Image (spheres, grey):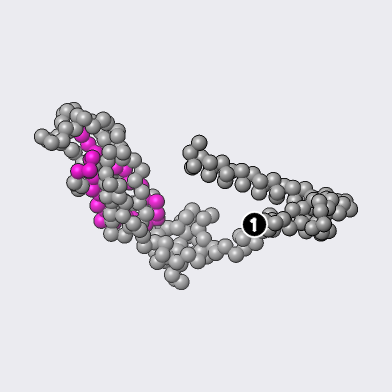
């Protein structure tokens, strides 16, 4: 057995022992709260506590376990709701196109104006994500189309979008596609790749997206998307 496997088993056993101790203490606490059984506590040489309903030796001392408390989750949820800032989650989301409210906060899609989220933070950056990357075969045997599909996961229009694509660690080349991606919108970028004397596309299977590399940038994007 490898050292890594032994370490994994040791951690699993430790977790099971910890869980068993919790269940044991919980059971003792429940019994103590419902009956008059005496509980004894002992500090072991390794510093760990040991509980039992009878003294194991002279080091065992009578003790009382804390009573179990049932937490009121409904009350806790209502409290969390009460301290959560007003937002657009129940009002169709943020509509950045409407611009900021008078106080600089966002306006919700249904016209709700009580949200306190700052317009400057929520409506200044677009969040693009590559939804799909694939290779499509053309009729010509020495040509293929490299494609990536972008989705905008924000209420902000992505501007000056630039997508570069490459295959098998080749140099990145500019792909054709729209320079803007609408809020929550999708856009496709493609590049026709040709075989040459040192690179034969016939060796590349279709739809092998793991062989695609790309770099996507835009003027107001939160980050540059890259895969090399």
In-image side of 220 versus 43 (left or right) = left
Quadrant of the rendered structure where residue 220 is? bottom left
In-image side of 92 versus 14 (left or right) = left
Number of numbered discs visible in the structure rendering = 1
Residue 100 magenta-drawn?
no
Q: How far from the left and from the top, in percent, is residue 124?
A: 36, 62
Q: How far from the left and from the top, in percent, is residue 207?
A: 30, 33
The residue carrying pointer 1 sits among few (fewer than 14), some (14 to 19) or many (20 or more) residues within 10 Å by Cα, namely few
Q: Secondary structure at mark 1?
A: helix
Most distant residue in the bottom direction: 103
Residue 160 magenta-drawn?
yes
Q: Nearer the viewer, residue 17 or 95?
A: 17
Does residue 67 appear in the picture of this structure?
no
Q: Nearer the viewer, residue 74 or 25?
A: 25
- Seen in the picture, residue 12 relative to 223 is either above or below; the reply is above
Quadrant of the rendered structure where residue 209 is? top left
Q: How far from the left and from the top, in percent, is residue 86?
A: 54, 63
Q: Nearer the viewer, residue 160 or 24?
A: 24
Report the magenta residues as a range: 144-170
Residue at 21% from the left image edge and 30% from the top image edge: 203
Most distant residue in the left direction: 197
- Seen in the picture, residue 158 relative to 200 is either above or below; the reply is below
Residue at 27% from the left image edge and 44% from the top image edge: 213
Residue at 28% from the left image edge and 47% from the top image edge: 228
Residue at 13% from the left image edge and 36% from the top image edge: 198
- Seen in the picture, residue 45 relative to 116 is either above or below; the reply is above
Does residue 87 appear in the picture of this structure?
yes
Q: Which residue is mark 1?
A: 77
Q: Nearer the viewer, residue 169 or 96?
A: 169
């Amino acid at each position: 057995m490898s050292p890594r496997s032994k370490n994994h088993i040791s951690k699993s056993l430790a977790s099971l022992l910890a869980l068993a101790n919790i269940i044991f203490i919980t059971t003792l606490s429940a019994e103590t709260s419902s009956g008059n059984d005496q509980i004894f506590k002992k500090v072991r040489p390794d510093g760990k506590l040991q509980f039992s309903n009878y003294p194991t030796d002279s080091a065992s001392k009578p003790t009382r376990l804390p009573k179990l408390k049932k937490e009121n989750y409904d009350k806790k949820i209502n409290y969390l709701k009460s301290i959560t800032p007003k937002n657009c989650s129940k009002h169709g989301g943020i509509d950045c196109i409407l611009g900021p409210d008078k106080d600089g906060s966002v306006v919700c899609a249904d016209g709700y104006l009580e949200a306190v989220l700052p317009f400057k933070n929520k409506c200044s950056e677009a969040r693009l994500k590559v939804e799909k990357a694939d290779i499509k075969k053309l009729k010509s045997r020495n040509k293929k189309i490299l494609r990536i599909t972008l989705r905008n996961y924000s209420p902000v229009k992505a501007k000056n979008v630039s997508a570069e694509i490459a295959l098998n660690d080749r140099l990145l080349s500019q792909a054709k596609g729209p320079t803007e991606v609408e809020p929550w919108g999708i856009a496709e970028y493609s590049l026709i790749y040709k075989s040459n004397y040192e690179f034969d596309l016939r060796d590349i299977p279709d739809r092998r997206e793991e062989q695609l590399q790309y770099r996507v940038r835009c003027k107001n994007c939160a980050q540059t998307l890259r895969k090399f």
